[in-house]
Image: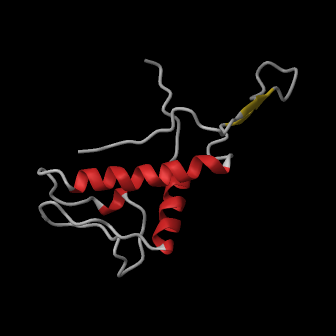
Amino acid sequence: MTMAQSLQYPFSRGSIQITSSDISSPPDFDAGFLSHAADLAPQVWTYKKMREIMRRMPSFRGELEATHPQFQPGSKAACINEYQPFASEVLYSEEDNKAIEEWVREKVETTWHAS
């Protein structure tokens, strides 16, 4: 099972600028993801809340570590790789929060699509 998070009204804004009078020249495009500091905290909170929801589902059988932040060895936030019915609450340290912030920065992308 997979869950995704998105900010419906982010403060961050991108830009697009004409770079030349030549029509074949590519524009200067900046998506602006996370360019406003206020957009990071809700993404971190949502990651934690979605993880909590998934871990409490009766169908929970473990987490795929490759799809989560890289928590330090021994972290209480480390992924569970085996069946644990109704896994306990995750306790995040400041180091864990920084790992989540870095993960969000690396993984954020647009939710826009053609349909």
Height in image: 26 above or below 30?
above
Outermost residue to the bottom? 74
- Asked which quadrant contains residue 81, the reply is bottom left
Q: In the rendered view, does 51 fall on the left or right side of 87?
A: right
> Quick one: 101 or 68, which is closer to the camera?
101
Height in image: 38 above or below 71?
above
Where does residue 8 sit, x and y in percent of width and height?
A: 51, 32
Q: In the rendered view, does 67 fall on the left or right side of 82?
A: right
- Asked which quadrant contains residue 92, the reply is bottom left
Total labels: the figure holds: 0
Height in image: 61 above or below 81?
above
> Quick one: 33 or 27, which is closer to the camera?
33
Q: In the rendered view, does 9 fall on the left or right side of 25?
A: left
Q: For the point 84% across and 21% down, which residue is it?
A: 22
Q: Which part of the image, by quadrant, shows the N terminus?
A: top left
Q: In the rendered view, does 35 fall on the left or right side of 92?
A: right
Height in image: 90 above or below 112?
below
Q: For the point 42% across and 68% down, which residue is it?
A: 70
Q: For the point 42% across and 62% down, which residue is it?
A: 69
Where does residue 90 sit, x and y in percent of width and height?
A: 32, 66
Q: Which part of the image, by quadrant, shows the C terminus?
A: top left
Where does residue 64 sit, x and y in percent of width and height?
A: 27, 59
